[in-house]
Image (tube, rainbow, N blue to C red):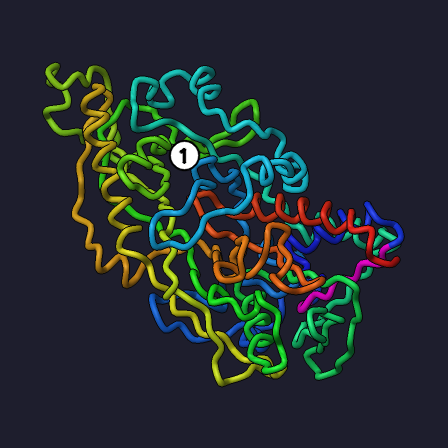
Amino acid sequence: MVGAGPAGLTLALEVARARSDFLVVIAEAGGLEPPPPELGDLYAGRSLGAPYPIETSRLRYFGGTSGHWGGWCRPLDSSDLLPAPAGAGPGWPIARSDLYSALQAAHTWCEIPNSSYDASEILARHPGRLLDLRDSALFDNALFRFSPPTRFGTRYRPDVETQENLNCVLNAAAVRLLIRDRTCEGVLIKSINGAARVIEASMVVLATGGMETTRLLLQTAARPDIAIDGLRSPALGSYFADHPGLRPGELLAPAGLRYARFDEQTGAVMPLIVPRPKAMQERNWMNACIALNPLPAGGDDRPSYAGNPGFGLAGEHWRYRVHMIVEPHAVSESRITLDQQTDRLGVPRLRLDWRVSRRTIESGVAIFAALARELGRLGLGRGRILPVDVAAEIAAPSHGFHHLGTTRMADSPSEGVVDRNLRVHGSDNLYVVSSSVFPRFGFSNPTLTIVALACRAAAHLANDRSRAA
């Protein structure tokens, strides 16, 4: 197992517990604490497209990026598992039930006490805090839930230390996959002082995050002796995506709405406004969510027409600034490649050409415009649509540190790098567990789905009775 972040620790512990006859070894590139500043350049790379924080978006120590995770959790929507929009490559090859089968276990790993995402329950318990959208054919309410957040390195270090058939090697960066024909026979690891050793294995799983996993696979694919189909796939390194934010306007809506995080009896929640699946399909929208932030002036700074009974806006109203997260439309030209420069361990640095599709931004703008009209029709509010410079949003988008899409899952190596079981196409025993396997992204933060995929992959690996102890 390469990497000790949420995916690596979850999968390693699940497999070790399920198969006492296995010896599971985790190779983690960092130590137990964040590395000193002088080692920060190990993640340095070049950003060729839209600017991206290549170095700071990753954490190189035990626990991985859970060290700066905000704890936002939500499963992918069922609509996210439908075929991808035209031009975005294939969608998920697995059914919703395949992905959702491990969700309860993922909630346990992420320490989320409640796994219900039915916003109608929140509306019933907190009347007046959410818009009643039951009469809308276009929009509905949805929820995020929150992990504490779980710092996987701190929370699960005792489990790793006490699991007899599980070893973790720290400061052990994977620098080369040892591949013969279709089999990955092990991993060459190096410490920062140059000491090297080989860990042999009958199964190898890469769980080092979207960028590092892709970098290691691209380095492997560059070797002329490699004939594994997934490493020759045109999808390897392609379709990089992250979740851009958008602020397309304001709403005048009833006072006291709580489309922001708050604590209630089932745990911390954050209600959202989302487009309904049928509306997305009919209007060719990407998925998106809308949060509302009350402006400081509150109800004292509402337009004069708010009191006009002809608009149906009776009672106190506040102004809310709209913040959206929009599902990125995947484009193959958005990609990770390798640089000629290498880091101090001899691994080629990565180059990221992040490209945000015009369709992504325009879809977000269209969704908010439709919401403004719909709230007016229902007498629930009024919208103020602010000009959005689409070209500027494409050139300098916001980001969520979500590294998606570059080793995507597909049924064919012509369309993806890994198969339904996360095995690299054409390999006997090389697997990837990362948000980089997502072929379609939704708007949800990826950690919960990553952990669910790790649980699903663990069950698959533990059930492989062909492997010797």
Give above or below for 157 relative to 121.
below
Using the image, determine if residue 84 lies above or below residue 261: below
**Position above or below: 268 against 308:** below
Residue 374 painted magenta: no
Mark 1 crowdedness (10 Å alpha carbons): few <14, some 14-19, many ≥20: some
Query: Magenta segment: does it hold 27?
Result: yes
Residue in the picture at 38% in, 54% down: 88
**Residue 324: image location, x then y, percent:** 33, 43
Above or below residue 429? Residue 258 is above
Q: Position of residue 74 (x, y in %)?
A: 51, 38
Does dot 1 land on a helix, a strand or a loop?
loop
Q: For this rendering, which residue is in front, 408 or 273?
A: 408
- Residue type at mark 1 is Ala
Q: Quadrant of the C terminus?
A: bottom right
Where is residue 187 drawn, in percent x and y? 72, 72
Q: Residue at x 33, y 66 (%)?
A: 50
The number of numbered badges drawn on the structure is 1
Q: Is residue 22 left or right of residue 141?
A: right
Q: Is residue 395 left or right of residue 277?
A: left
Instruction: Residue 327: give x, y in percent of width and height.
Output: 38, 47
Q: Residue at x 56, y 47 (%)?
A: 447
Residue 105 figure quarter? top right
Q: Which residues are magenta?
A: 22-30
